[in-house]
Structures are given as structure tokens and as C-alpha cells.
Amino acid sequence: MDMKDNIWVYSDLAGRYAELAGGVSSLGGKAQAIVVGSANSAAKAAASGVGKVHHMAFDEAGIVDNYLPGMVKLIQSSGDSFLVLVAATKRGRLMGARLAARLGAAVVSDVNGISMDADGLTVTHSVYGGLAQGTEKITASKAVLLVAPGAFDAPESAADSEVVAAEAETSDDVKCLGHHPKQASNIDIGRARRVVGVGRGLKAKEDLAMVDALAQSLDAEVGCSRPVAEDGMMEHERYIGITGVKLKSDIYVALGISGQVQHLAGINACRTIVAVNKDKNAPIFQHADYGLVGDLNKVVPALTKLLAQ
Ligand SMILES: Cc1cc2nc3c(=O)[nH]c(=O)nc-3n(C[C@H](O)[C@H](O)[C@H](O)COP(=O)(O)OP(=O)(O)OC[C@H]3O[C@@H](n4cnc5c(N)ncnc54)[C@H](O)[C@@H]3O)c2cc1C
């Protein structure tokens, strides 16, 4: 069977099947979906525009990663040539990579476009932390694509598909040793209109008070670079970048942040970037609309004072 006629989709989050269905319909086909979860999740997937849904009932005490053998078996039984689209959630990335390894398939991550012609499958995906686009031609007969969030629009309307029970063959590769509830957090700096970000240029936790004062006078949220969160100076929900929050703010003020590519990937959708750094050669200045070379310990209080006038 041709790859185009044998497409599968998988997501650990039921809400992402509609986007995957959109990606498949851009190829002019329908996919079969694998759902590891509740009957509700299977019904949600079935209503999202995918084709037949293979539902593996999930044991609430289990770990979704351990359902890999059943998924591999199902896909392998469909033929020698197939395409699998996996939603690139945190768990999906892991599952997609393991699936590709077990299936002996080519794998491409961060995919945001797919097309298929007589020569085969072409995919576009973001590279260098979202700063550039790469185009890859898949020459293998089996491929797993990790689909970036928002890459495809959900189909406008979709009829319910058939749901069939699938054998949930599991492994015990991953064992859960315990659950620790995370402290509830309502921080969502990804939606803030203005954000002040601090980097390793800020030396002590006490210095956050002056940053908070500046943020208050700007009516802004405070974010940070990843090392600042990893050092425990700020919550993980506040770090910005490729592996953190992606901002869409009107203003982003970067204080003592060097501007590494992984951080830039989280701010390249901001409308205006202001950078303060004591090193005039810091890469952040190449991406800033306004740059101020100086010691943030002097610049931040001075800016706050100015804004108060
Ligand atoms: C796989 C991977 C994923 C990653 N994901 C992310 C991510 O999502 N987000 C992220 O942020 N990073 C991420 N990183 C880390 C990233 O590569 C950088 O190490 C990090 O962004 C640097 O943080 P920084 O700019 O705060 O620190 P530094 O690079 O150490 O820069 C500190 C800056 O502060 C300036 N400075 C020092 N003192 C002062 C002062 N008194 N006044 C003014 N300026 C001063 C210095 O000149 C310097 O430019 C990732 C790395 C890897 C390998």
C-alpha cells in the first residue's frame, strides 16, 4: 500500500486530533487514529475529522508511554509503507521518537507543513529554535512526523467516525514511582501585552524587587531566561524561549539577557523589543528595536524613576 493511503495520527491530548486531521486532509486523504485514553477521548477524536479510531482503553494507574507495543503492532499490521503524524506535545515528542525507532521509520520534528506528490513526501519544519525553516524530502517508505502546535487548521466540519476497540498491548518500560502535585499556578505570561524579562545579568534574588518595580510602572508581567528559572530565582512558568513560554507581547524588555537563539525563539513574535545589557556586543542587540548599553543595576531604577514622572 502507498504511504498516502496509509496515514495514522496519534496525540496524547484528545484536543489535538482536529489539527492532525487538518494536516491529513491537506494531503487529500483521511487517517486512522490511535487513541490511548478514555471512551470520551476516543469520541472526541472521532468527531474531529479523522477516519476510523482505534481505541486502546487506558488504565488510569498506567503510563501512556507503555502502550507503545500495541501502537507499533497496529501500525505494522497496516502494511510496509505508512505515514504517522504525532502531535508534538511534551509526551508526544517522546512517543513519536520511540515509535519511529521501533518502526524503523524516518522522523522529522517541529513539522509545520506537508505536501505529497509523485516523488514522495516533502515536509517543512522550523530549525534554529524557530528562526528559520528547513525543507526535507522523505525518501523512506515509513515516516513519523512530529507536528508542531497550530501547524494545521482543523477541518471546518467533520462527521463522526467509527470507533473500534484495539488491543492494548503494553510494556513496563517506564515505571511511575510516585505523584507529587504541582503547586497551582495561574501565571500565563504568554498572554501578557507587556513583559520584562531578566537574565543572568541579574545577580541576586533580592534584585528582583527593582525589576518588579519597573514591571509595575510598565503594567508588565515579569519573565526570565531559562537559567534564571533553573537556578530557582523564578518559577518555571515564567521562562521564555524554545522550551519555555512563547510571547506575543507588544513590548518585551530584556534585562541582562545575552540573546541566545533558544531565548530568541520565545520573543520573535513580540512587536517591540528593548534590550539592556552591559556588553555592547551582546547578540540581543541585533534583535532589539531599542538598545541600551549599561549596567542594569543603574538603568532599571533610573527607568522606573523616569516612568513615574
Ligand atoms: C536544548 C536547550 C534549550 C534551551 N532552551 C532555552 C529556553 O527556552 N530559554 C532560554 O532562555 N534559554 C534556553 N536555553 C539556554 C540558552 O542557550 C542560554 O544559555 C540562555 O538563554 C542564556 O541566558 P541568559 O541570557 O540569561 O544568560 P547569559 O547568556 O549568561 O547572559 C547574561 C547577559 O547578562 C549581561 N550582563 C551581566 N551583568 C549585567 C549587568 N549588571 N547589567 C546588564 N547586563 C549584564 C551579560 O553581558 C550577558 O549578555 C536552552 C539551552 C539548550 C541547550
Image: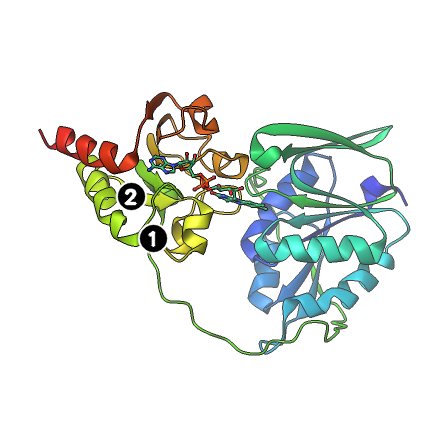
Position of 63 with respect to 199 (left or right) is right
296 or 8, which lies in front?
296
Label 1 packing within 10 angstroms: few (<14), some (14-19), many (20+) = few
CB-based contact (under 8 Å), mark 2 and mark 1:
yes
Going by the numbered disc 1, the residue's amino acid type is Ile
Which secondary structure, mark 2?
A: strand
Quarter of the image for residue 111 reads top right
Residue at 21 percent across and 38 percent down: it is 214
- Residue at position x 59%, y 69% from top? 38
Please state if 129 lies on the left or on the right of 287 as rendered.
right
> Is 178 on the left-hand or right-hand side of 1?
left
Q: Residue at x 62, y 53 (%)?
A: 160
Q: Is residue 100 above or below residue 113?
A: below
Q: Quadrant of the C terminus?
A: top left
Q: Give the left or right position of residue 286, taking residue 293 as reference.
A: right
Q: Position of residue 60 (x, y in %)?
A: 58, 76
Please name the residue that numbered disc 1 is placed on: 187
Residue 139 position in % (x across, y down): 86, 36
Image quarter where the N terminus lies is top right
Q: In this figure, which residue is indicated by the disc labeled 2?
A: 221
Q: Report the Cα–Cα distance between label 2 and label 1.
A: 9 Å
Q: Residue at x 72, y 72 (%)?
A: 173
Work out whether residue 49 or residue 1 is closer to the camera in this orientation and state it: 1
Question: Considering the numbered disc 1 on the image, is that residue within a helix, a strand or a loop?
Answer: loop
